[in-house]
Amino acid sequence: MGEVARAHANDRLKSVLHVTPKGPAHPLSEQWIDLRLIAGMRVVLGTSALLVVLIESMEARVWTTPIHLTLALYSLYGLLIYHLSVRRKPVVAHKIIPWLDLLWYLPLVAFTSGTNSSFYYFFFFSIIVASFTWGLTDGLHLTLASAAIYTIVTVIAASRPIAVNRLLLAPIGLLIFGYIIARWGGYHTELKNRLKLLKDVTVFSNPRFGIDRTIKAILESVRDFYDAEACLLVIPGKPGDSDSYQMYRVARGIYPSRSAPPEIGPEAAAQFLSPSLEHAVIYRKNHSSHARLFDVKTRVFSEAPTGAGDKLSGMLDAQRYLSVPVYYRHQAVGRLYIVNGPMQIDGPDMEFVLQLMDHVTPVMENIRLIDNLASDAAETERRRIAHDIHDSVIQPYLGIQFGLSALDHKLESGDVAIRADVQELLELTKHELAELRRFVWGLKAGEERMDVLLPAIERYAERFSLVTGINVDVESHGKVKVNDRLAAELFQIVAEGLSNVRRHAFCRDARVEISCKETSLQLQIKNSRPRAGSPVEVERPEGHEGIRAFRPRSIAERAAALGGETQVYVDEKDYTVVSVGIPL
């Protein structure tokens, strides 16, 4: 089982460090649902058009075999694509599919008098599919191609001269409405990809991989998202320490190493932190250098001298780069560089990268905090074991040593009446061996202790307060005695609750209250009301002691697994309370 778990962890790490390229080349389950829906609509479009044409031909008693045959073949083609989408064949997600649709519509337009063709509207189906699946660029390409090919086919298929106004009206409509569709589709696709990146960043933040691997995985996902040559992150080696910095770097085609990032001194770091940690920078170098500064506080762009940018572009070997400040506790401490990314980077891209780093920084801080807490817990446990060994092993053996020394003195003085002393030492040895076996067995299996929860929470709260600056008070009502397994789950609930307070509440104090009765245990995590705009902000109408707010998913799932329930409300002291009730 251990080998299987390690293999699973290695596979997960590879999936973290080898980021799957964005886009539908490797569709996810929800993308397959969209592709299947599109394929189904293609079948409905073809079969319904064939049915309408058949009804029209029967009423007019005029049979246009080429149109009927083309629509029948197009319906069969649609059924084939739908079958492939159900089987999840990668070809369905290829960009060529909307272009094949476009080719099917050309004979339909040619056989139905060009400008009077009712199949003119079919072109919008291809434009919508391309725009909402691959984005603005593909939507615009298909729009231009549809307008051009439609005009050419109309002119060639016309049996008599066509008025210019009738000839131009349809292509202009295609260009106008196609452009609007492409813009909306591109915006939708961009938002979807950004949300996927934010989700991936959260998934990558696994504390068991450590801070270094997590940061490299996040940088690789950002680099892949922007299709950049490299991503670079310069941050202090320790929070609040400006004497040494660490430089994390990932590049295209290079597998991220597992080694620790190199450390650089403050002089070298200053070159990467310039011109100011209050500004983001967009730099381009074509025929001439051009740099723009973006004030992250005022949200205003300004021109920047290119001297420093030219020097930095030489160090990075970059023709263009985007650089944004990285914050720790609302103070800029480092910089992120996206090197040789997309040709066009504008204000919305800048805003998104800043928001992304605001989302990533707490993740890195939490992992670092967990690492520190784990290290401190291990160190505390080592000290406890050392203390137990001193009391349980060394001290008794010192007594045996003294006893043997007394026997030696008796023998040296000629006293041979030592049998009683030897038996006493043997009894002492037997007793201490039994205690030693009990101690070792306790290390292997652990004992069922009922008083571990409260001391563990108090130690964690003390360390949490020291690291985060948030004062945490722990209070218990009644004797809190639960077994180890339940204590471990409750401890995780407290850790998750305090982590939520730290990430979302922006307050300086919190409380953990535990009350234990014969049949139930009540755990409450309280914090003073968050500032306006916080994700956990709760509005309380007049006449109500409190209303339901958000339900922290992780805590609610743990409580439900224990047979309990979770409530969130605002109490009479205007504190936000996460209350967990567990039956005993």
Image (tube, rainbow, N blue to C red):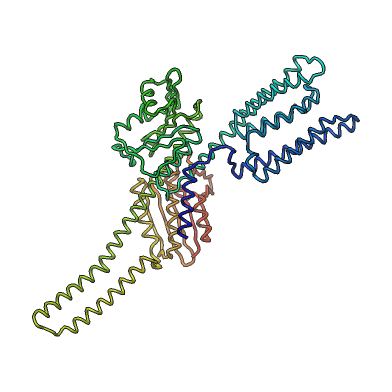
Q: Quadrant of residue 394?
A: bottom left
In the image, 326 versus 105, the foreground residue is 105
Q: Quadrant of residue 61?
A: top right
From this view, report whether residue 508 is shown above or below residue 148: below
Q: Residue at x 51, y 39 (%)?
A: 197
Q: Position of residue 393 (x, y in %)?
A: 26, 68
* Image-based side of 447 in relation to 52, left or right: left
Q: Extreme left residue here?
A: 413
From this view, report whether residue 187 is shown above or below residue 466: above
Q: Position of residue 520 (x, y in %)?
A: 48, 63
Q: Residue at x 23, y 71 (%)?
A: 396
Q: Position of residue 529 (x, y in %)?
A: 45, 44
* Image-based side of 84 in relation to 68, left or right: left
In the image, 305 versus 556, the foreground residue is 305
Q: Residue at x 67, y 23 (%)?
A: 175
Q: Quadrant of residue 245?
A: top left
* Image-based side of 135 in relation to 101, left or right: left
Q: Residue 545, can we see it?
A: no
For the image shown, how many numbered marks are present on the structure?
0
Q: Residue at x 42, y 48 (%)?
A: 209
